[in-house]
């Protein structure tokens, strides 16, 4: 097994408006992209579990082959800049993705 961080060229999160955070996982090798896509690991259920959110909070969950990318968007627990907000730009939310194991 290899982690997603070892296979992806870029793993990032960012603000997607006051109520959502979006995540991008980018690859530079079509074979590696296909391996991750075909592994069946990156699913709505898995991401909801990883981020301790209901599946309905995952708004987008898709692979986009022309860019060799996986993207998902999740609802924020509050709103951007609201009480308790600790990452207004959403730039530090991707860390749980890094250690996801991808089967060989």
Image (cartoon, helix red, strand yellow):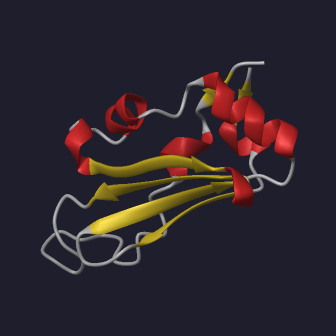
Q: Percent x, y for residue 27?
A: 77, 52
Q: Percent x, y for residue 76?
A: 25, 61
In which quadrant of the rendered view does residue 9 lie?
bottom right
Q: In the image shown, does 77 or 71 lie closer to the viewer? A: 71
Q: Percent x, y for residue 59?
A: 31, 53
Question: Does residue 92 lie above or below 9 as drawn?
Answer: below
Q: Percent x, y for residue 33?
A: 75, 41
Q: Residue at x 58, y 32 (%)?
A: 100
**Residue 23 horizontal side relative to residue 84, left or right:** right
Q: Residue at x 50, y 58 (%)?
A: 23
Give the number of marks.
0
Q: Residue at x 22, y 81 (%)?
A: 81
Q: Looking at the rendering, in which quadrant would you find the C terminus?
A: top right
Q: Residue at x 21, y 43 (%)?
A: 56
Q: Looking at the rendering, in which quadrant would you find the N terminus?
A: top right
Q: In the image shown, does 69 or 97 lie closer to the viewer? A: 69
């Amino acid at each position: 097994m290899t982690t997603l961080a070892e296979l992806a060229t870029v793993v990032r999160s960012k603000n997607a408006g006051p109520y959502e955070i979006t995540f991008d996982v980018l690859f530079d090798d079509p074979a590696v992209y296909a391996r991750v896509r075909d592994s069946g690991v990156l699913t709505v259920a898995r991401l909801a579990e990883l981020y301790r959110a209901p599946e309905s909070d995952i708004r987008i969950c898709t692979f986009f082959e022309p860019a060799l990318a996986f993207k998902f968007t999740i609802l924020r627990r509050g709103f951007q800049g609201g009480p308790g907000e600790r990452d207004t730009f959403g730039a530090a939310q991707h860390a749980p993705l890094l250690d996801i194991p991808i089967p060989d």
